[in-house]
């Protein structure tokens, strides 16, 4: 019998996984119960899943994950109240059904912005109100920074129509509906990249100065066996901690391919790559443990290699980014991570 990941790190921080509702039954449910004490929905709490059309809220799939977590004494994260992807197009259409982003008349643009922020406010309040007693940790906005876009802000419909006010509105609505006990995060990938990190830092600092209630930064941490460096990942957390913010590793996985590599190893991932992955996962968790004062949890984006977005992105191929293989067996990376807990 192998050790439990979550129990091994019990003195350090919670260990989580992103799941789909179907994984709350069968062998995956057993694997999750044994190894994680934190859950997040991989897709079913995204805007389009919960409010596919205005005023129609679909709770069934999200509720399944909440119920599974409660039955098994696991905590939950919410992902995500706002995103530019997986969001209903209806949010961004004016009263006549035209795309708000196309509007050129200043008065109409102002009216569109008001309508969009009202819709956002209602979306956030309805969801937070339903889950505030079950979910303590919330991704309020996801992936708003884009260094290649003007001002370093992603040129999404949200930003093009409302500027950064959509961010302030979402955080304020979440705080008002959820009260002081829920923790509110701004979540993004590539936060190790100095330019992106600094853009995020400047945004968050300005919002905090304006009194916007942000509690922490979610670092997705979709990395690969070659990069980025563990030091760069930790340096980013330190920087946000200086602002008094919490950090969470929200979507951890480690591709066996470099980011620009389009090969497919197939079922036979080379031994040296598996070993490199184990080594790097160990270094990463050693750094996480050593910095637990500024890091309040680690969530994997999946649990086993048979179900991960990286089997389909950037091309369809066999990837192996997690600690368990396609048969739910512990990989060398698992043992490497277990070896550096505070228990050992
Ligand atoms: O639900 C539909 C289904 O009805 C349809 O038949 C099928 C056909 O393609 O698609 C299904 O939707 C898919 C959805 O996952 C649910 O399985 C989408 O195609 C697919 O694109 C979508 O991918 C998700 C992706 O976000 C969307 O951007 C991944 O599962 C999910 O892991 C990924 O998660 C994101 C985080 O939210 C934010 N950070 C990056 C991370 C990885 O991309």
Image: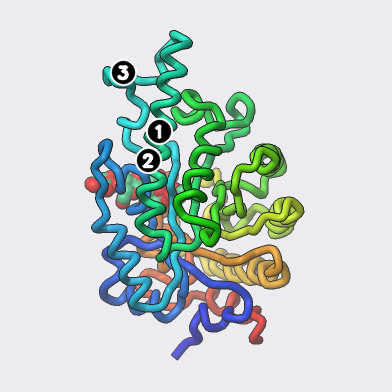
Looking at the rendered image, the quarter that the C terminus falls into is: bottom right
Does dot 2 land on a helix, a strand or a loop? helix
* Disc 1 residue: CB within 8 Å of ligand 1: no
Q: Residue 167 in the image: state x and y as whole percent.
A: 53, 38
Residue at figure coordinates x 31%, y 48% from the top left:
50
Q: Are marks 3 and 1 in contact (CB under 8 Å)?
A: no
* Disc 2 residue: CB within 8 Å of ligand 1: no
Q: Mark 3 or mark 2: which comes first in sequence?
A: 3
The residue labelled by disc 2 is 122
**Residue 94 drawn above or below residue 11:** above
Residue at figure coordinates x 56%, y 64% from the top left:
273
Q: Residue 190 in the image: state x and y as whole percent.
A: 60, 46
Does dot 3 land on a helix, a strand or a loop? loop
- Foreground label between 3 and 1: 1
**Residue 154 drawn above or below residue 39:** above
Label 3 to label 1: alpha-carbon separation: 17 Å
Residue at figure coordinates x 56%, y 31% from the top left:
164
Q: Is residue 284 left or right of residue 140?
A: right
- Which sits in the foreground, 269 or 178? 178
What is the quadrant of residue 203 in the picture? top right
Residue at figure coordinates x 64%, y 53% from the top left:
227
Colouring used for the render: rainbow
- Foreground label between 3 and 2: 2
Q: Are marks 3 and 2 in contact (CB under 8 Å)?
A: no
Q: Residue 207 in the image: state x and y as whole percent.
A: 64, 39
Q: Is residue 55 left or right of residue 66?
A: left
Label 2 to label 1: alpha-carbon separation: 6 Å
Q: Are marks 2 and 1 in contact (CB under 8 Å)?
A: yes
- Which sits in the foreground, 341 or 182? 182
The residue labelled by disc 3 is 98
The dot on residue 118 is 1
Does dot 1 land on a helix, a strand or a loop? helix
């Amino acid at each position: 019998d192998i050790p439990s990941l979550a129990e091994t790190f019990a003195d350090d921080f919670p260990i989580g996984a992103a799941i789909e509702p179907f994984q709350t039954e069968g062998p995956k449910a057993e694997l999750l119960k044994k190894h994680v004490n934190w859950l997040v929905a991989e897709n079913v709490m995204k805007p389009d899943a919960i409010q596919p059309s205005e005023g129609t809220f679909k709770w069934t799939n999200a509720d399944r994950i909440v119920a599974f977590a409660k039955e098994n004494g696991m905590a939950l994260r919410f992902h995500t109240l706002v995103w530019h992807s997986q969001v209903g197009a209806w949010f961004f259409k004016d009263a006549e059904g035209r795309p708000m982003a196309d509007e050129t008349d200043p008065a109409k643009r102002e009216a569109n912005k008001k309508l969009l922020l009202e819709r956002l406010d209602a979306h956030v309040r309805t969801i937070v109100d339903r889950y505030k007693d079950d979910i303590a940790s919330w991704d309020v906005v996801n992936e708003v920074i884009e260094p290649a876009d003007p001002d370093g802000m992603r040129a999404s419909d949200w930003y093009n129509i409302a500027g950064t006010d959509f961010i302030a509105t979402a955080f304020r609505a979440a705080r008002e509906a959820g009260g002081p006990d829920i923790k509110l995060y701004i979540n993004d990938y590539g936060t190790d990249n100095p330019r992106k990190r600094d853009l995020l830092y400047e945004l968050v600092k300005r919002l905090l100065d304006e009194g916007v209630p942000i509690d922490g930064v979610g670092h997705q941490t979709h990395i690969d066996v070659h990069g980025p460096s563990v030091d760069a990942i930790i340096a980013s957390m330190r920087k946000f901690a200086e602002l008094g913010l919490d950090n969470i590793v929200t979507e951890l996985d480690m591709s066996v391919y470099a980011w620009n590599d389009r090969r497919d190893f197939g079922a036979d991932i080379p031994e040296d790559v598996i070993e490199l992955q184990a080594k790097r996962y160990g270094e990463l968790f050693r750094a996480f443990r050593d910095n637990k004062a500024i890091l309040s949890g680690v969530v994997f984006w999946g649990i086993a290699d048979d179900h991960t977005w990286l089997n389909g992105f950037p091309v369809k191929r066999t990837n192996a980014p997690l600690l368990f293989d396609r048969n739910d067996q512990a990989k060398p990376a698992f043992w490497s991570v277990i070896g550096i807990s505070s228990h050992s």
